[in-house]
Image (spheres, grey):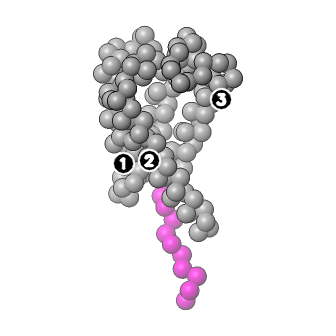
Amino acid sequence: MQRLKHSKTTLRGILAVCMVVAGILHFAQPEPFIRIVPGFLPAPAALVYISGVIEIGLGIGLLVPAVRQQAAWGLVVLFIAVFPANLNMAINHIEIAGVPNTWWFQAIRLPFQLVLIAWAYWYTRPELPQVSSQP
């Protein structure tokens, strides 16, 4: 049980760092993100910057015990909300430097969104209190 708790803590840290880095990339290199925003959505650049702020905030929130569960729920919603952009990239074969544009990559990448949703959902549950084995 202790090992699972340690793994969960480590993986939460990894997810938090990944989200903060992804959010920063929305500002450092916004063009690839802007290109995959579906055409039916207004103001693609604004959406990219807003989602970048949200990613940074939720990533940091995962590390703050008082808001950890809310941040995790926010990530679940965010991962669902950005799926249309990922789908748009796959369907319209939008090429981004450094990202493979092959059917096999998209076949892995799109379902991986479910892994991200499950990963974030794992942190929506309250942490179990430490149980001491000593009397």
Measuring 55% from the left and 24% from the top, which residue is drawn there? 99
Reading the chain from its start, which is encountered first: label 3 or label 1? 1
Mark 3 — residue? Answer: 108
* Secondary structure found at label 2: helix
Q: Is residue 48 above or below residue 2?
A: above
In magenta stretch: residue 126: yes
* Secondary structure found at label 3: helix
Q: Name the residue type under label 3.
A: Ile
- Callout 3: few (<14), some (14-19), or many (20+) C-alpha neighbours within 10 Å? few
Q: Is residue 11 above or below residue 74?
A: below
Q: Assign the C terminus to one quadrant of the image.
A: bottom right
Distance from disc 3 to disc 2, alpha carbons, whole Å, reads: 22 Å
Q: Disc 2, disc 1: CB below 8 Å?
A: yes
Measuring 46% from the left and 27% from the top, which residue is drawn there? 82
Q: Is residue 79 above or below residue 130?
A: above
| Residue 71 rendering spot, x and y as whole percentages | 40, 46
Mark 1 — residue? Answer: 60
Between 15 and 97, the one nearer to me in the picture: 97
Specify the label residue 16 is tagged with: 2
- Residue range corresponding to the magenta coloring: 125-135
* Secondary structure found at label 1: helix
Distance from disc 2 to disc 1, alpha carbons, whole Å, reads: 6 Å
Q: Is residue 32 above or below residue 75?
A: above
Between 125 and 111, the one nearer to me in the picture: 111
Q: Name the residue type under label 2.
A: Ala
- Callout 2: few (<14), some (14-19), or many (20+) C-alpha neighbours within 10 Å? many
Q: Is residue 83 left or right of residue 51?
A: right
Measuring 32% from the left and 35% from the top, which residue is drawn there? 53
| Residue 116 rendering spot, x and y as whole percentages | 55, 39
Between 100 and 92, the one nearer to me in the picture: 100
In magenta stretch: residue 96: no
